[in-house]
Image (tube, rainbow, N blue to C red):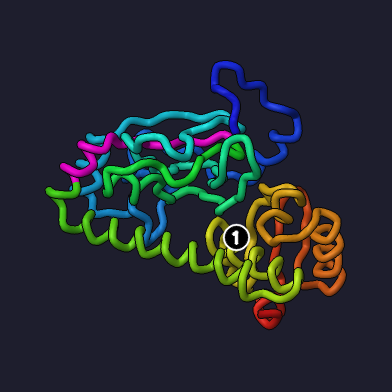
Amino acid sequence: MGKPVADLMIPADVHVRQKHLPRQIPAGCAACSNRRPGWFCSLGSAVLADLELATSTISLPAQASLFTQGEDARCLYLICSGYLKLTAGRPDDRQMIVRVAGPGSMLGLYAVLSHGVYEVSAESLTTAQLRPVERDRFLSFLRSHKEAQMRAVQCICQEYRFALQDACRIALSETVATRLGRLLLELAHQIGEHTPGGEYRFPLLLTHEEMASMTCTTRETVTRTLGQFRKAGWISIEDSMVTVHQPEKLQMLM
């Protein structure tokens, strides 16, 4: 669980994670260079202006807790920059990493729409900038804008797809190589960028131990399997960045 913001000390290794983060966004969403088609914040200019009126901007240091599983969902959060990990489990027991969320992600949408509680905990992996939206203000915003309603539905569908990917990675993958290959491709699509040459690049934000927990194996096996992928030329890892050179090879493992 992340440390309280007031008591937080950022360790040296966290600064390595900052190198390849998207730029901090300008004050206005319309001028943000991080926006991408399909993200909730990629709305029409008039709708986006109303969304900005309903939000503020907060900064979160690395390794800080944003919200905890089981808490009443009074806000949802749009990630403008930085990365957070979402985990599920009991506080004093084993935690399962559900996924890594990056710029453009909306956290707490289902919980807010259902007037429920957060189903996962969110902790920052890097420094992050977010826009919180209080539940009542967000619901009022949705009632006023059909475009935003459709975008919210798309975001819920995306969350379903992520959950299905998790289930398939764990239940339908017989080998560690297959599970790890699935995970790398999921991270590439969720937080990476697709280069003109057909490669994917994304920041290495998870430790081998964390990747092991997401692929039901050991840290040593993850290290060994990544080494095999690198030796085969399928991926490379340099300066805290993963490049998937041959995604089709990882796809063939499935």
Say above or below: 53 vs 7: below
User: Which residue bears the numbered disc 1?
Assistant: 187
Task: Judge whether residue 27 is colored magenta.
Answer: no
Image coords of residue 137 (percent x, y)? 21, 37
Most extreme residue toward the left, as rendered?
A: 144
Q: What element carries label 1?
A: helix
Could you tell me which quadrant the C terminus lies in?
bottom right
Image coords of residue 154 (percent x, y)? 32, 63
Most extreme residue toward the top, as rendered?
A: 6
Could you tell me which quadrant the N terminus lies in?
top right
Q: How crowded is mark 1: few (under 14 residues within 10 Å), some or many (20 or more)?
A: many
Front position in the image: 208 or 166: 166
Front position in the image: 15 or 181: 181
Q: Does the rendering let one see residue 62?
A: no
Residue at image coords 60%, 37%:
126
Residue at image coords 43%, 50%:
105
Most extreme residue toward the bottom, as rendered?
A: 252
> Toward which corner of the image does residue 89 lie, by quadrant?
top right
Instruction: Answer left or right for 80 relative to 22.
Output: left
Type of amino acid under label 1 = Leu
The magenta region covers: 127-141
Task: Judge whether residue 134 is colored magenta.
Answer: yes
Image coords of residue 127 (percent x, y)? 57, 34
Residue at image coords 46%, 34%:
67
Say above or below: 178 vs 156: below
Image coords of residue 225 (percent x, y)? 82, 66
> Toward which corner of the image does residue 27 lie, by quadrant?
top left
Residue at image coords 54%, 22%:
5
Front position in the image: 237 or 9: 9
